[in-house]
Image: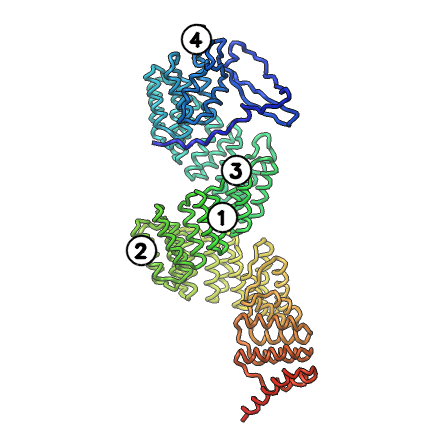
């Protein structure tokens, strides 16, 4: 049986208790009554304004039947009692809400004069129900049934059933349904509607169907609301087929669907992941005279995003903004568009839409904040994600599990597993229980950083806390094992999944096959693929791409081609990744014609090349040393606005250098600088090589100054020595020393020739003390300075009268002469 959520404490209501001021208040007169005899049950808007202190409040007031209208016998009974209060219904509700539901609510109600008027009871229940306080409403209802002048009414029971439905208390709602019949109160169409709605909210759509049949047996004709509630109960659980059948029955019975019905059917398609059917239904809906509203278009945008039709989703959003009077975009609309841009990888647009929502005067909820937070997290933008997380708190909202998990994921994707763990621990400290997604995100953070032991330990912690791992957990661990080259661990994870009864899905199989491929266990990968086929798991494009690219790396081209043929036989569309793998396979075999035909076929099928595909094409033309074709491919990339990366740039530079197009290499270097593309070791080597061939040492030195020490290991010692020599001759001694530090830090083998260049240039500018320091560096590195080197610096020490250095140099010269045979 479902239990009601705990009620938050009710704070004092300033609208019901306006502050006292020394000045006489100004009251806004209510609207004149049109029906004087029934004014007691009408709601009135009452306002209070205090100009001196700048305060105002507006409240809704329901009078009810007062002391002057109750029967005379009761009026005489309460007239002389100072304990009896002639409260209005709104005042009674305020007094009841001030009392906790376990305290003496009946004592408050027994002081109310209006309890002797039967007409007040529906008003009281209605106002209590509007506050959403279930426990208070239940206590008031029990008190009401014990009053002598109480009479069971349909509207009271209907309101109570609807309130229980709001809290998913179906058993209590059904109990009220039978109780009202015991009081000889016959259920009407609203009663059945409320009960169907209660079961629909709880996902009990079969119960809702049975109640509909009971309604028909009771000869109560269903209304449009009845059908809508029934369709909603089926659709909320994704049972779109049943929802569609009820919609057809509704039309056959002469009850035409309205906009609410169409929205519920669309929502049923959405919940059942039938996005194409939802869009087809929307096209049929447009042919009728029913115009869509904001809810309709929100569902359509959601379905378009799920189908990857992001352009159409944005077009509908822009149309909604243009026609605000008809379908104004709401919080859900903006949140859906933020999610769409996030999936596309257009993070700048995510922030722009969020700012647009604020400019429209809409207040974001926690779901909107989480959408933007998740967009930053998916790209590892931990600084921006942390800023949004702090903004959630600053705006008075409490971060939920999704918020913490997104921030955790942001740190994990940016390679900071320790920070991710801190967020995970902070989530537990703030009484926000981590779910399976949270654990999987932290496992992925550890696995991506190569911390396999911590990832496995977290899996045990996950099980200890009562959360069973799923396929995502297993897939994440398998991928981590592949990155850490732990063959034994891969077998252990697969065995652990089997012992826990986890049936691997296609994602888990792909992770396992990819991990075996990455550690060189190709036969095990093929065996696992056969096992997958035996278990009736259909491979997808990712599976074939892993197999084709993995076998291609070790030159098993015949087996790769077999998987290509098998993929085509199964009519699985080739993805961008598969096309790239095919281009790489054909280029390694020298089959340039097949490379070009595959690239053209990719474009003809509407599969637009990405940076990986273009890089594969550049590499293919590089093998045959055709720099012109490679340059054309690069221009095609620019034309299609394909985002460059360091690998594509370095591959093109290599082809250009081989074709003696060193000037174009420097053009590419400038382009990388303008587009803020980081230099990798290959690009640095190609740029320095081009500068060397062009004797452009000035450009080379500028590049070197911005290079990380780790990149120097890819450069030859000859080029580095030339750079040092150029810097020394140009008088840039400090830059020359900095370059030398970077060379040593990178772990490159420094020869005696490198030190000779340093010494020669230091002595040329008179820095003989630094000269002696470099001689000491040579000795520390195990390279013995020559007699010639010491003789060169001795006159400079004599000239500066530095006898300490003179004695030291002479000792070294004598030592070297003694060792000469």
Q: Closer to us: mark 1 or mark 2?
A: 1
Residue labelled with disc 4: 77
Q: Taking the image as drawn, is residue 782 in sight?
A: yes
- Mark 4 neighbour density, 10 Å: few (under 14) some (14–19) many (20 or more): few
> Which SS class for mark 3?
loop
Of the two numbered discs 1 and 4 on the same chain, state the one appearing first in sequence.
Answer: 4
In the image shown, does 699 or 686 lie closer to the viewer?
A: 699
1 and 4 marks in contact (CB < 8 Å): no
In the image shown, does 584 or 181 lie closer to the viewer?
A: 181
In the image shown, does 410 or 671 lie closer to the viewer?
A: 410
Indicate which disc residue 495 carries. Answer: 2
Q: Quadrant of the N terminus?
A: top left
1 and 3 marks in contact (CB < 8 Å): no
Residue 209 horizontal side relative to residue 808, left or right: left
Q: Closer to us: mark 2 or mark 3?
A: 3
> Which SS class for mark 4?
helix
Of the two numbered discs 2 and 3 on the same chain, state the one appearing first in sequence.
Answer: 3
Q: CA distance from mark 3 to mark 4?
A: 53 Å
Q: CA distance from mark 1 to mark 2?
A: 32 Å
Residue at x 51%, y 31% (from the top left corner): 286
Q: Residue furthest bottom?
A: 821
Residue labelled with disc 1: 407
Of the two numbered discs 1 and 2 on the same chain, state the one appearing first in sequence.
Answer: 1
Q: CA distance from mark 2 to mark 4?
A: 81 Å
> Which SS class for mark 1?
helix
Q: Closer to us: mark 2 or mark 4?
A: 4
- Mark 1 neighbour density, 10 Å: few (under 14) some (14–19) many (20 or more): many
Position of 749 relative to 252 (above/below): below
> Which SS class for mark 2?
helix
């Amino acid at each position: 049986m479902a239990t009601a959520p705990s009620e938050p404490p009710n704070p004092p209501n300033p609208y019901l208790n306006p502050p006292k001021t020394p000045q006489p208040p100004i009251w806004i007169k209510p609207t004149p009554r049109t029906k004087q005899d029934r004014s007691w049950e009408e709601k009135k808007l009452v306002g209070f304004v205090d100009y001196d202190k700048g305060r105002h409040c507006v409240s809704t007031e329901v009078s009810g039947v007062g002391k002057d209208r109750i029967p005379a016998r009761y009026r005489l009974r309460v007239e002389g009692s100072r304990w009896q209060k002639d409260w209005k219904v709104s005042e009674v509700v305020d007094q009841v809400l001030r009392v906790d539901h376990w305290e003496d609510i009946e004592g408050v109600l027994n002081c109310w004069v209006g309890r002797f008027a039967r007409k007040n009871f529906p008003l009281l229940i209605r106002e209590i129900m509007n506050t959403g306080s279930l426990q208070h409403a239940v206590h008031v209802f029990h008190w009401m049934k014990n009053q002598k002048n109480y009479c069971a009414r349909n509207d009271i029971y209907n309101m109570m059933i609807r309130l229980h439905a709001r809290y998913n208390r179906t058993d209590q709602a059904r109990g009220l349904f039978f109780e009202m019949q015991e009081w000889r109160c016959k259920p009407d169409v609203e009663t059945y509607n409320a009960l169907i709605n209660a079961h629909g909210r709880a996902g009990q759509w079969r119960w809702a169907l049975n109640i509909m049949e009971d309604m028909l047996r009771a000869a109560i004709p269903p209304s449009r609301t009845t059908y809508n509630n029934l369709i909603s109960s089926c659709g909320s659980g994704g049972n779109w087929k049943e929802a569609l059948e009820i919609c057809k029955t509704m039309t056959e019975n002469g009850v035409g669907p309205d906009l609410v019905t169409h929205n519920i059917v669309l929502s049923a398609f959405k919940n059942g992941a039938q996005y194409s059917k939802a869009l087809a239904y929307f096209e049929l809906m447009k042919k009728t005279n029913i115009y869509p509203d904001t809810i309709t278009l929100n569902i359509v945008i959601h379905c378009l995003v799920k189908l990857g039709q992001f352009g159409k989703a944005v077009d509908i959003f822009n149309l909604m903004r243009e026609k605000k009077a008809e379908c104004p975009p709401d919080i859900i609309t903006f949140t859906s568009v933020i999610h769409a841009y996030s999936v596309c990888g257009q993070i700048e647009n995510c922030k722009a839409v969020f700012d647009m929502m604020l400019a429209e005067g809409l207040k974001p909820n926690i779901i909107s904040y989480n959408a933007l937070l998740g967009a930053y997290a998916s790209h590892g933008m931990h600084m921006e994600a942390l800023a949004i997380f702090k903004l959630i708190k600053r705006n008075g909202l409490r971060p939920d599990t999704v918020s913490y998990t997104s921030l955790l994921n942001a740190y994990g994707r940016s390679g900071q597993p320790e920070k991710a763990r801190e967020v995970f621990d902070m989530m537990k400290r703030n009484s926000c229980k981590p779910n399976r997604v949270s654990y999987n995100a932290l496992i992925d953070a550890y696995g991506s950083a190569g911390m396999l032991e911590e990832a496995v330990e977290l899996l045990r912690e996950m099980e200890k806390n009562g959360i069973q791992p799923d396929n995502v957990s297993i897939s994440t661990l398998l991928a981590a094992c592949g990155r850490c080259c732990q063959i034994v661990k891969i077998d252990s994870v697969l065995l652990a999944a089997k012992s826990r009864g986890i049936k691997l899905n296609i994602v888990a199989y792909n992770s396992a096959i990819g991990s075996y491929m990455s550690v060189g266990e190709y036969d095990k990968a093929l065996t696992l693929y056969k096992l997958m086929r035996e278990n009736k798991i259909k491979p997808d494009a990712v599976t074939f791409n892993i197999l084709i690219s993995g076998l291609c790396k070790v030159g098993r081209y015949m087996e790769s081609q077999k998987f290509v043929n098998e993929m085509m036989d199964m009519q699985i569309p080739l993805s961008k990744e598969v096309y790239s793998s095919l281009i790489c396979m054909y280029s390694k075999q020298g089959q340039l014609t097949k490379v070009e035909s595959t690239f053209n076929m990719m474009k003809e099928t509407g599969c637009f090349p990405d940076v990986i595909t273009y890089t594969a094409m550049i590499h293919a033309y590089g093998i045959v040393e055709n720099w012109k074709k490679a340059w054309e491919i690069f221009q095609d990339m620019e034309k299609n606005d394909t985002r460059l990366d360091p690998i594509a740039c370095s591959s093109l530079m290599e082809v250009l250098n081989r074709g003696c197009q060193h000037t174009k290499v420097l053009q590419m270097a400038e382009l990388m600088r303008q587009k803020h593309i980081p230099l990798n070791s290959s690009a640095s080597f190609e740029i320095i090589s081009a500068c060397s061939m062009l004797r452009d040492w000035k450009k080379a030195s500028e590049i070197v100054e911005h290079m990380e020490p780790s990149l120097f290991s890819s450069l030859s010692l000859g080029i580095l020595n030339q750079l040092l020599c150029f810097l020394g001759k140009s008088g840039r001694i400090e830059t020359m020393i900095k370059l030398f530090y970077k060379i040593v830090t990178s772990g490159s083998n420094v020869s005696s020739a490198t030190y000779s260049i340093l010494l020669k240039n230091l002595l040329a500018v008179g820095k003989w003390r630094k000269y002696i320091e470099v001689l000491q560096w040579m000795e520390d590195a195990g390279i013995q300075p020559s007699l010639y080197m010491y003789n060169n610096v001795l006159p400079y020490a004599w000239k500066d009268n530095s006898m300490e250095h003179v004695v030291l140099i002479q000792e070294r010269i004598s030592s070297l002469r003694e060792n000469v045979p």
